[in-house]
Amino acid sequence: MPDAKHDLLVIGAGPGGYVAAIRAAQLGLDTACVEKVRELGGTCLRIGCIPSKALLESSEQYAHAQSGLGVHGVAVSGVALDLEKMLARKDRVVKTLTGGVAALFHKNKITRYRGHARLQAPGRVVIDAAGGSTAVEAERIVIATGSETAALPGVEFDGDRIGTSTEALAYPAVPERLIVIGAGYIGLEMGSVWRRLGARVTVLEYLDRILPGMDREIAAEAQKLFTKQGFRFRLGCRVTGARVEGDRCIVAIDGEEPLSADRVLVAVGRRPNTAGLGLEALGIATDAQGRIPVDDRYQTSVPGVFAIGDVIVGPMLAHKAEEEGIACVERIVTGYGHVNYDAIPGVCYTHPEVAAVGKTEEQLAAAGIAFRKGKFPFRANGRARSLGAVDGFVKMLADAETDRLLGVHVIGPRAGDLIAEAAVAIEFGASAEDVARSSHAHPTLAETLKETALDLDGRAIHF
């Protein structure tokens, strides 16, 4: 006999899992959620999205106080870094939000189990914890266990000097030299934090470009701006190993002299966290990348067992997992749920920010889709001039025949906020003309989207 029964059991309390559990409870299901660590919120909230953004904001404030206020007529002297206080603030932000998720579980009467969940049979999960095991049965099971940092052959993690973004969130002192392996979102964001605080940052990337997956023109502009800030980039190089020797970290590069640094951050991507779930007990096979195949209802090959978020195909983004969690549960209960994968934005929270939604220019060209392109620079925008943040531009791609928006790409101030308008426009099938004809408040950064839409037709007003 099981120790407990529920209508729906979610494995994992990250953005996909806890949101799915809340929506299921709202729809009237007796819902439970299993999480192996004490704090709710998953990697994103505990050691990912939230703490990194807290440090990005604090480090940007520090850098701005050091050298960005003089142009505004504000004279500042004696600016000093209190790293301990900065890290403590980051921890408070995380604690507040993990506590908020716990409060939402209580509000929605969601049963919480702490431990490691193993699928034992369809509709049956065993939860292993320090105090013993608990058998739980549920009519529906949703796997939302997220992802973990991918390893790199030859790199010896020591949990301190050579580590992942988790260690980089809590360096006890600013490293004199930091090597970042990987030029994606995570590497550039955490590299930005420590560069602003005084580290000399070198980024090593196997590809011939930074920000893989982003529009190449946008990525090239980002590299140019980051280089001006002090980043050193080594592209097209293959890291073959990294080890600690005394008080230094040594990074080996194929065909080149090894590099030395105080710390090494490995940020070469993530892999689905599916090991130890007991998938084999149910006959669920993962693909070559370790992902769980699902149908358009997010159901696996076993009826009643579903999967969402980083463990299935698609970008490993917290908001993508949230949308899938809601859609999965709504399809279970109502028969209908919706996720438009063309309208899921991505944001790199560097300075300037980089954001995108929809297709890149390279993707459209490869697919043989005829398109028109519009661009507008932030230096021609009044609000950007007032902020003193004029680097970057907006790029808009529209179908050459129908004018429907296919992709929007932004590098510039508050790009992560601006991209929301573009995501809504693509979600509703808007044309560039729709954006161009919509009134945008003046002076705002959002006017750059309107001007870019106008530029698609060769009629930008302010450039």
Image (tube, grey):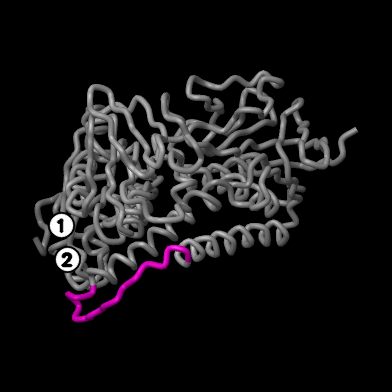
Q: CA distance from mark 2 to mark 1?
A: 7 Å
Report the residue marked by disc 2: 381
Q: 358 or 247: nearer the eye?
A: 247
Q: Is residue 397 visible?
A: no
Q: Residue flagged by tag 2: what amino acid is it?
A: Asn
The secondary structure making up most of the magenta span is loop
Q: Position of residue 2 (x, y in %)?
A: 87, 35
Residue 377's disc is 1
Magenta span of residues = 69-84
Residue at 41% from the left image edge and 32% from the top image edge: 243
Mark 2 touches mark 1? (CB < 8 Å): yes
Q: Position of residue 86 (x, y in %)?
A: 45, 65
Q: Position of residue 133 (x, y in %)?
A: 82, 36
Q: Residue flagged by tag 1: what amino acid is it?
A: Pro
Circle 1: is it few (<14), some (14-19), or many (20+) Cα within 10 Å?
many
Residue at 41% from the left image edge and 45% from the top image edge: 344
Q: 249 or 324: nearer the eye?
A: 249
Residue at 23% from the left image edge and 34% from the top image edge: 235
Q: 181 or 51: nearer the eye?
A: 181
User: In the figure, is residue 23 to the left or right of 246?
Assistant: right
Q: Secondary structure at mark 1?
A: strand
Circle 2: is it few (<14), some (14-19), or many (20+) Cα within 10 Å?
many
Q: 104 or 389: nearer the eye?
A: 389
- Point out the image quarter for the N terminus: top right
**Farthest residue, direction right:** 1
Residue 409's disc is none
- Point out the image quarter for the C terminus: bottom left
Q: Secondary structure at mark 2?
A: loop
Residue at 45% from the left image edge and 52% from the top image edge: 171
Is 73 contained in the magenta span?
yes
